[in-house]
Amino acid sequence: MIYTVLWGLLFAGLVGFYRVVMGPTVPDRIVAADTVSTILTTFLAVLYLLFNDMVFLDVALAFAVLSFVDVLVMAKYFEHGELHL
Amino acid sequence: MSVFIRLLSSFLMALGLFFAFASVVGLIRFPDVYTRVHAGTKALSGGAMLILIGVAVRAPSWQGAVKSVLIALFFLATNPLASHAISRACYRHGIAPHGTVLDEYGEAMEDRS
């Protein structure tokens, strides 16, 4: 069951990555990158069950925080054309 | 590990995998940025939370279960915020939604400015 979930998440991430590469406009790519990062975070959390190593969950939590900040900064840069920090 | 826990975790993970696939199919098939935001973020946050709760049910130690639920709560807090930021930036940038008839937000913004 764990292997099925892993392969399914990998396939979903690859299909989402198609939208990152081929997206017609910039916000399409931002949305698809957000989706792929969420799928990868879930993938890391399932890898914790496979290897029984706590470091995968720590990396997943850090990756979730970083991708959230990443998407916010990209959306703000796309809105204004520059960063008003 | 009892059979019931294994069955419950497998059921939650399968449901979350279905949501992830539905979200990715919507990301490919939908015509517009806003509908893609809807498909990509809303369905996927539910699917990712289901898979993470399945991991927490099956986790070998209670620390792992707590951390997994923590990641799920983090998704619940941040994923709507990110999707709102993206769609707001798209609208302010001037991308019109596909097939709109009435645009009250644009009229309100023009009235204010």
Image: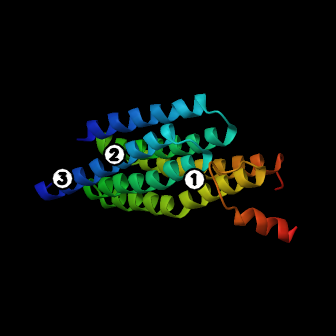
In percent of width and height, residue A72 lies at: 67, 53
Q: What residue is disc 3 on?
A: B6
Q: Is residue A16 left or right of residue B98?
A: left
The three-letter amino acid code for the residue at tag 2 is Leu
Q: Looking at this view, name the residue that lies furthest to the left.
A: B3
| Chain letter belonging to callout 3 | B
The crowd level at tag 3 (other Cα within 10 Å; few <14, some 14-19, many 20+) is some
In the image, residue A80 lies at what x, y percent?
Answer: 82, 50
Q: Chain of mark 2?
A: B
Q: Which mark is residue B17?
A: 2
Q: Are marks 3 and 1 on the same chain?
A: no
Q: Secondary structure at mark 1?
A: helix
Which quadrant of the figure has residue B85? bottom right
Q: Residue at x 59, y 47 (%)?
A: A67
The image position of residue A1, as x and y in percent, is 22, 41
Instruction: Tell me which amino acid carries mark 1.
Output: Val
Which label sits in the foreground, 3 or 2?
2
Q: Which mark is residue A65?
A: 1
Looking at the image, which residue is at 59% across and 29% down?
Answer: A21
Mark 1, other Cα within 10 Å: few <14 / some 14–19 / many ≥20: some
Considering every residue shown, the one lying at the far front of the view is: B101
Contact check, label 3 and label 2, Cβ < 8 Å: no
Amino acid on which the number 3 mark rests in the picture: Arg
Q: How far separated are the C-alphas under marks 3 and 1?
A: 30 Å
Disc 1: which chain?
Answer: A
